Image (spheres, helix red, strand yellow):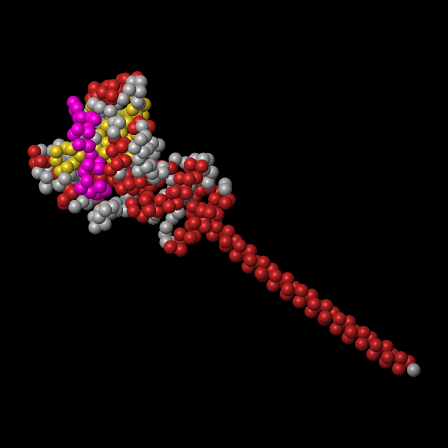
């Protein structure tokens, strides 16, 4: 009896022990499965974190790279999340076409002449907080004009009426190209082109402008009184190109003169050399930024009559430029350095025609003038080898009267603007020059 009871107890104990072991194994297996699941999740999390960290590093690298390129401009852009996203989206889009091309963002409240660099085509993003409707309208225009007029065609000149006349390519260093691009965008193509109103008052459309350095001060004082007597109540904008202090005071005292001093810091260093004459087209361009037209006159110009007929005449012949003191008596070819003709070629038939005096010009801000004259005047003025090629000298000897040969002298801005006008208007000289009986001024050099 006792033996049977003991046997039953041992058997039950064995069963209970076996059951306990099975239950423990199951729990351990469940726990192991949970640990494996957690491990997998941790691995996934670590992988996700690593990828995220990698993206952050890439993003940080872009920001650091951008800061290296744009300096303080990126700091300003980084404060605006939307602007930063726009910047990177433009950067990524451009990289598809050119991995080496850098994008430049022009920040708000920065002088446009010091916009950010771009190694290829320069593109300036307009400020997002344009304050006026006029600025918005201009921005819309620039979407269409920028590529065609300021970027793609800046490399070389092609005559508008003769596509076989193709000039040598213009090459600029990056700082010079940036300055030029901004002149073209913010001056040449800033305003909507004008249409000539033949019934408009002349001086409501055209602003008289002149300028002088100290060596032409006496000439200016002698001839400017004739302007005042022929055009009473009309003010002249005078650009100081290097007057002495006493001369500045005298000019400022003239009641019909608005004094300005040309800031050469906005332009390449050669513009400071007044004997390159690069300053004249750049002054004219400054004025056309704010006004519909310019009546430029050198200090040697003496006015003798009124200008009542001028706008009607320019509207009739559909011309945006007018030389109003006649011809030089020699050809364009005779007084144009061949180095300039490399950039702005012309036919032989046109080259031997009269060169008109750029001492006195009326230039209206028409579409043709913007695209085919002022743009290229500025481009050439920014390139010393174009406006003043090596070997250029102003003095011409008797051989200048030979119309079919270069006489060894150069007329700088005058030669350039004659080439551009001739290539634009062709043989119709009467479209952009006055005949003797129409002239209202003469040259009176000292």
Q: Is 431 part of what is drawn in magenta? A: yes
Q: Residue at x 41, y 41 (%)?
A: 139
Q: Is residue 23 above or below residue 404?
A: below
Q: Residue at x 63, y 65 (%)?
A: 36
Instruction: Decide if residue 269 is in sight here.
Output: no
Residue 439, horizontal then vertical, whole percent: 19, 28
Observer-nearest of 353 and 419:
353
Q: Is 224 part of what is drawn in magenta? A: no
User: In the picture, residue 422 is in which quadrant?
Assistant: top left
Magenta residues? 423-446
Q: Is residue 4 left or right of residue 43?
A: right
Q: Is residue 133 left or right of residue 437?
A: right
Observer-nearest of 343 and 272:
343
Q: Is residue 105 left or right of residue 148?
A: right
Q: Point out the image quarter for the C terminus.
A: top left
Q: Residue at x 89, y 79 (%)?
A: 5
Instruction: Decide if residue 225 is in sight here.
Output: yes
């Amino acid at each position: 009896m006792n033996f049977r009871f003991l046997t039953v107890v041992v058997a039950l104990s064995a069963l209970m022990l076996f059951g306990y072991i099975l239950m423990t194994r199951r729990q351990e297996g469940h726990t192991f499965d949970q640990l494996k699941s957690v491990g997998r999740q941790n691995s996934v999390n670590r992988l996700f974190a690593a990828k995220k960290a990698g993206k952050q590093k890439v993003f940080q690298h872009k920001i650091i790279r951008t800061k290296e390129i744009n300096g303080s401009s990126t700091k300003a852009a980084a404060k605006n999340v939307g602007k930063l996203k726009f910047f990177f989206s433009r950067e990524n889009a451009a990289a598809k076409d050119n991995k080496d091309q850098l994008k430049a963002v022009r920040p708000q409240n920065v002088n446009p002449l010091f916009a950010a660099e771009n190694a290829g085509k320069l593109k300036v993003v307009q400020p997002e907080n344009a304050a006026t409707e006029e600025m918005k309208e201009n921005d819309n225009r620039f979407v269409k004009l920028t590529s065609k007029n300021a970027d793609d065609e800046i490399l070389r000149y092609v005559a508008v009426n003769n596509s076989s006349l193709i000039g040598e390519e213009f090459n600029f260093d990056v700082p010079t190209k940036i300055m030029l691009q901004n002149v073209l965008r913010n001056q040449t193509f800033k305003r909507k082109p004008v249409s000539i109103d033949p019934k408009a008052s002349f001086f409501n459309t055209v602003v008289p402008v002149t300028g002088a350095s100290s060596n032409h001060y006496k000439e200016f004082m002698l001839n400017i009184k004739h302007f005042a007597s022929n055009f009473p109540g009309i003010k002249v904008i005078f650009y100081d190109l290097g007057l002495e202090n006493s001369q500045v005071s005298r000019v400022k005292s003239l009641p019909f003169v608005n004094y300005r001093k040309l800031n050469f810091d906005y332009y390449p260093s050669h513009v400071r050399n007044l004997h390159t004459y690069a300053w004249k087209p750049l002054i004219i361009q400054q004025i056309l930024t704010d006004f519909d037209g310019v009546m430029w006159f050198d200090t040697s110009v003496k006015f003798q009559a009124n200008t009542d007929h001028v706008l009607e005449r320019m509207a009739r012949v559909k011309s945006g430029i007018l030389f109003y003191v006649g011809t030089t008596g020699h050809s364009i070819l005779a007084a144009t350095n061949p180095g300039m003709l490399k950039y702005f070629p012309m036919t032989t038939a046109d080259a031997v025609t009269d060169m008109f005096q750029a001492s006195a010009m009326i230039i209206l801000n028409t579409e043709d003038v913007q695209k085919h004259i002022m743009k290229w005047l500025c481009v050439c003025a920014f390139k010393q080898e174009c406006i003043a090629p090596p070997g250029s000298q102003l003095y011409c000897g008797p051989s200048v009267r030979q119309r079919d040969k270069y006489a060894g002298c150069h007329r700088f801005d005058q030669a350039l603007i004659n080439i551009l006008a001739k290539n634009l208007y062709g043989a119709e000289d009467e479209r952009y020059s006055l005949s003797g009986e129409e002239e209202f001024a003469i040259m009176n050099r000292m």
